[in-house]
Amino acid sequence: MSRRRKKIKKSMSSFILTDKWFKAIVVKGQGRGKKIGFPTINLKSSKPFPVKTGVYSCQLRVDKRNYFGLLHFGRRPTFKNKKKTIEVYLPDQQLTVLAGKEVEFQLLSFLRPVKKFINRQSLVEQIKKDIQQARTKVEEKRFLKV
């Protein structure tokens, strides 16, 4: 393997956190994301989720189609929620996925840790920044030629 190919492979492996696709079931959420303009698909995994809490860029697979998204895993301290949850926001789609449906997701890159926001507006501003950061990371890696 050439030195360039090894460098690219190493770069891609640090970008895609795992080549593993995780399975989960869509569950009904509380509708908070929708109220602030970021409707999420709430997920429940039957197995422990083996990553640290935080916000990630991800791919969500529904009915054999992949969608770019942001995944939040962990508590939601802004809303005083102590239970760890998994939720995905798809910025480019108005996709309705019914509760009970099995989906798959893959983590692409870690964006930031979970944090408490002083109000909803600061949360909204951070989500917008997260979306831009995730798009930038995906675009940077998508155009690498192997």
Image (tube, rainbow, N blue to C red):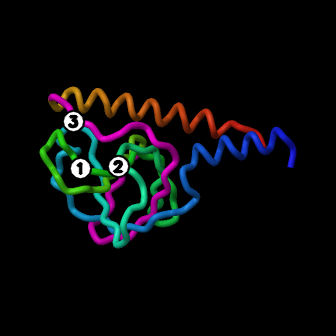
Question: Height in image: 27 above or below 129?
Answer: below
Q: Residue furthest left?
A: 80
Nearer to the camera, 15 or 23: 15
Give the residue type that dot 1 points to.
Arg
Left or right, residue 140 beside residue 48: right
Callout 3 crowding tier (Cα within 10 Å): few <14, some 14–19, many ≥20: few
Q: CA distance from mark 1 to mark 2?
A: 8 Å
Is mark 3 in CB contact (under 8 Å) with mark 1? no
Picture residue at 17% right of the left edge, 50% below the top: 31
Left or right, residue 120 beside residue 88: left
Residue that numbered label 3 is attached to:
116
How many numbered marks have been drawn onto this rendered protein structure? 3
Give the residue type that dot 3 points to.
Lys
Callout 1 crowding tier (Cα within 10 Å): few <14, some 14–19, many ≥20: some
Q: Position of residue 5 (x, y in %)?
A: 80, 43
Is mark 1 in CB contact (under 8 Å) with mark 2? yes
Give the residue type that dot 2 points to.
Thr
Residue that numbered label 1 is attached to:
75
**Residue 80, quarter of the rendered image:** top left
Is mark 2 in CB contact (under 8 Å) with mark 3? no
Give the structural element (helix, strand or loop) at label 1: strand
Picture residue at 45% right of the left edge, 56% below the top: 60
Task: Tell me which label, 1 or 2, sits earlier in the chain.
Answer: 2
Task: Tell me which label, 3 or 1, sits earlier in the chain.
Answer: 1
134 part of magenta stretch: no
Residue that numbered label 2 is attached to:
53
Q: Quadrant of the C terminus?
A: top right
Q: Position of residue 21 (x, y in %)?
A: 51, 63
Give the structural element (helix, strand or loop) at label 2: loop
Picture residue at 37% right of the left edge, 67% below the top: 24
Picture residue at 54% right of the left edge, 62% below the top: 20
- Residues in magenta? 93-118
